[in-house]
Image (cartoon, grey):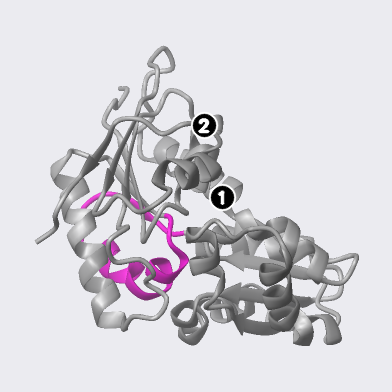
């Protein structure tokens, strides 16, 4: 039996649209409800309790919209709230950490893996724990990069300022001969060129959006939740605020203009 209910995807801001883009490419028949908590971005400097509260509020909203599965397209929320969401809602809830970890383990040649993310994501040790569970011999170097999200949100993704910030953040990883870096935030792919140019020449960056899309497909198939192939997937978006340069930022993340956007207030 086909299941034409939508997939719910949420992030603290618009960065999760990179995951939406990957889902649309792999699962074009699936409809998606995207929720960006743009009024309260970033999550990376907030407490675990607050991140759990925000994530539960958003998930409740999406559940009322009859979503058949959730994708927590936010590394901070995946690190801090995924377990609570999986216990609270009776549908599959998929985070972004595990898929990226699996890709990094299979990619790294010298076992030196770097993780860059928000303060909350790095402080949670979620990536290091997951990496060590896969291979206890890997050497993990964690680096919080709190300036990256506001740089992306302001549209500062090229030029001397982000390059100087990236070089400062990656100094330790370059010295440690890290050969694989996980982009532990959905905003960071927009800084991929800057980050790549600031890393050692042979360093490979792991953008987990494609890996997440693959996992979502497997979960939907396993649970008989796949939409009928003949359907044409639609994207409906919700935000808690319309920030400055909203259309420009959304276009950057999604790769195409964003339509059908509603502003909502969460309680």
Say left or right for 139 vs 253: right
* Residue annotated with mark 2: 256
* Residue annotated with mark 1: 209
Q: Is residue 83 magenta?
A: yes
Q: Disc 1 versus disc 2: distance between alpha carbons?
A: 17 Å
Q: Which image quarter is the C terminus in?
A: bottom left
Q: Taking 84 as reference, is 46 above or below it?
A: below
Q: Which mark is residue 228?
A: none
Nearer the observer, 62 or 44 = 44
Q: Can you give x and y, in whole percent of width and height, for residue 70 in the image? A: 33, 49
Q: How crowded is mark 1: few (under 14 residues within 10 Å), some or many (20 or more)?
A: many
> Can residue 138 be seen at all in this image of the molecule?
no
Q: Can you give x and y, in whole percent of width and height, for residue 248 in the image? A: 48, 43
Q: At x 49% / y 60%, what residue is drawn?
A: 154
Q: Can you give x and y, in whole percent of width and height, for residue 108 in the image? A: 80, 67
Dominant SS of magenta comes to helix
Q: At x 48% / y 47%, what residue is drawn?
A: 249
């Amino acid at each position: 039996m086909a299941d034409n209910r939508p997939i719910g995807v949420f992030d603290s801001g618009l960065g999760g649209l990179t995951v939406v883009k990957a889902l649309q490419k792999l699962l074009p028949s699936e409809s998606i409800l995207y929720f960006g908590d743009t009024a309260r971005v970033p999550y990376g400097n907030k407490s675990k309790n607050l991140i759990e509260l925000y994530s539960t509020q958003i998930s409740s909203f999406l559940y009322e919209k009859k979503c058949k599965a959730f994708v927590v397209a936010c590394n901070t929320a995946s690190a801090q709230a995924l377990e609570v969401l999986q216990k609270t809602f009776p549908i599959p809830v998929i985070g972004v950490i595990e898929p990226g970890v699996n890709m990094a383990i299979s990619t790294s040649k010298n076992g030196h893996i770097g993780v860059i993310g928000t303060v909350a994501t790095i402080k949670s040790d979620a990536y290091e724990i997951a990496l060590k569970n896969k291979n206890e011999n890997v050497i993990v170097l964690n680096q919080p990069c709190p300036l990256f999200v506001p740089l992306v949100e302001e549209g500062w993704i090229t030029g001397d300022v982000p390059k100087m910030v990236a070089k400062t953040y990656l100094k330790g990883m370059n010295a440690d001969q890290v050969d694989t870096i996980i982009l532990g935030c959905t905003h960071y792919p927009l800084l991929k060129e800057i980050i790549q140019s600031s890393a050692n020449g042979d360093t490979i960056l792991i953008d987990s959006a494609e890996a997440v899309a693959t996992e979502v497909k497997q979960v939907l198939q396993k649970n008989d939740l796949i939409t009928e192939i003949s359907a044409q997937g639609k994207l409906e978006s919700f935000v808690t605020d319309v920030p400055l340069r909203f259309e420009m930022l959304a276009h950057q993340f999604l790769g195409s203009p964003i339509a059908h956007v509603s502003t909502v207030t969460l309680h």
